[in-house]
């Protein structure tokens, strides 16, 4: 072949359908790398947004934790407000504690002149000698027992208790502040009520009922009492009372209890003694198991029967 033939351009003898497209490899690679980079950028952007969302959630959780703990400790705001209002209402409705007064509330209705003849019965005469000033002194003396500090009283040992063996014949009106009669036997305690309504008047219903039990001290015998030796209708002279350990000053109420709820009396008798009734039989030195069988030994005298009738009348008037 000559040189002119070599330099001459080659004729395209191929079929147009069979022509091969010539692709620029460098451009294709660049497009592919660009697409991959865009995809990576999108994925990294999504990850960044996810991390930012997680960070925000963590911040919100941290902010909520103290609030939740505070609400758990203090309760819901609405409930706390309602509880506070309820406490305030209870404080407002709480009865006002009595205060000492020189004059009895019924003083205007009583005359100082008493020209009536004294009863012949010693018990009745002792009761009739009670003056309104003496009653007011007793009312004032019981106020301190309402708010006295809580004191745990140990239960006396059985061998340290005794039935009343020494009885009062002459009351001491300076120290024997409350004259009361036994109106009910609860088994482990006795319910006593004042012999005169003026002790409670219209504002001290808490004085209507008091309990005598093993915590009560018989100052004549010098020992804690065994109630087996005290019967319904006996006249007792009380020198002091104390708030029962089951109560607080906030539990005090001037409303009198019914005879059914007398066992819930606010006061317990402290120091006391039994008054000697006319023709009084000797006290029964028996065990609690025998006290019901031998009850007649303390209730056989006419004076005791009279006192029992009087106690029943007082009891019915308080119902």
Image (cartoon, rainbow, N blue to C red):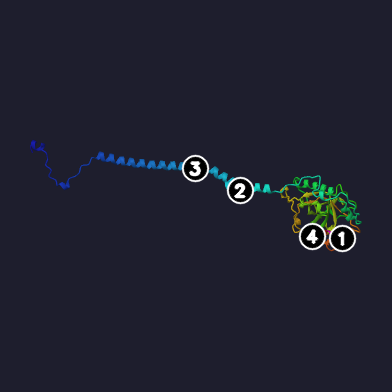
Q: Closer to the N terminus: mark 1 or mark 2?
A: 2
Q: Closer to the N terminus: mark 3 or mark 1?
A: 3
Q: Nearer the viewer, residue 96 or 222?
A: 96
Alpha carbon separation for disc pair 1 and 4: 16 Å
Residue highlighted by disc 1: 306
Answer yes or no: do the residues labelled 1 and 4 have beta carbons within 8 Å?
Answer: no
Residue highlighted by disc 4: 316
Residue highlighted by disc 3: 60
* Majority secondary structure of magenta residues: helix
Q: Closer to the N terminus: mark 2 or mark 4?
A: 2
Q: Residue at x 49, y 42 (%)?
A: 60
Q: Residue at x 50, y 43 (%)?
A: 61
Label 2 neighbour load within 10 Å: few <14, some 14-19, many 20+: few
Residue highlighted by disc 2: 82
Q: Closer to the N terminus: mark 3 or mark 4?
A: 3
Q: Closer to the N terminus: mark 1 or mark 4?
A: 1
Left or right of residue 223, residue 51 in this image: left
Label 3 neighbour load within 10 Å: few <14, some 14-19, many 20+: few
Say how many tags the image has. 4
Q: Position of residue 101 (x, y in %)?
A: 79, 45
Q: What is the span of residues highlighted in magenta in the rendered image? A: 303-310
Left or right of residue 12, residue 269 in this image: right
- Judging from the image, what secondary structure is the residue with disc 3 in? helix
User: Of circles 3 and 4, which is in front?
Assistant: 4
Q: Position of residue 214 (x, y in %)?
A: 80, 53
């Amino acid at each position: 072949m000559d040189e002119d033939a070599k330099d001459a351009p080659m004729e395209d003898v191929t079929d147009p359908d069979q022509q091969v497209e010539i692709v620029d490899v460098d451009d294709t690679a660049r497009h592919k790398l660009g697409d991959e980079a865009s995809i990576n950028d999108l994925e990294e952007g999504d990850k960044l947004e996810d991390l930012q969302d997680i960070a925000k959630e963590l911040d919100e959780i941290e902010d909520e934790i103290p609030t939740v703990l505070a609400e758990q400790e203090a309760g819901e705001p609405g409930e706390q407000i309602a509880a506070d209002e309820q406490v305030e209402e209870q404080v407002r409705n709480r009865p006002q504690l009595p205060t000492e007064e020189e004059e009895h509330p019924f003083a205007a209705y009583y005359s100082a002149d008493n020209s009536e003849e004294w009863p012949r019965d010693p018990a009745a005469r002792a009761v009739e000698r009670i003056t309104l000033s003496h009653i007011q002194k007793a009312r004032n003396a019981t106020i301190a027992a309402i708010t006295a500090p809580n004191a745990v009283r140990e239960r006396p040992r059985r061998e340290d208790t005794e039935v009343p063996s020494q009885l009062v014949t002459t009351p001491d009106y300076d120290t024997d502040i409350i004259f009361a009669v036994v109106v009910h036997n609860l088994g482990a305690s006795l319910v006593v009520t004042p012999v005169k309504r003026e002790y409670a008047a219209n504002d001290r219903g808490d004085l209507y009922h008091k309990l005598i039990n093993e915590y009560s001290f018989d100052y004549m015998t010098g020992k804690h009492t065994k109630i087996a030796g005290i019967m319904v209708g006996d006249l007792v002279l009380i020198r002091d009372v104390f708030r029962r350990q089951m109560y607080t000053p906030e539990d005090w109420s001037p409303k009198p209890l019914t005879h059914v709820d007398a066992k819930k009396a606010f006061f317990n008798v402290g120091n006391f003694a039994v008054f000697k009734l006319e023709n009084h039989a000797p006290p029964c030195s028996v065990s609690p198991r025998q006290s019901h069988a031998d009850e007649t030994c303390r209730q056989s005298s006419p004076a005791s029967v009279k006192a029992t009738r009087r106690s029943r009348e007082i009891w019915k008037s308080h119902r």
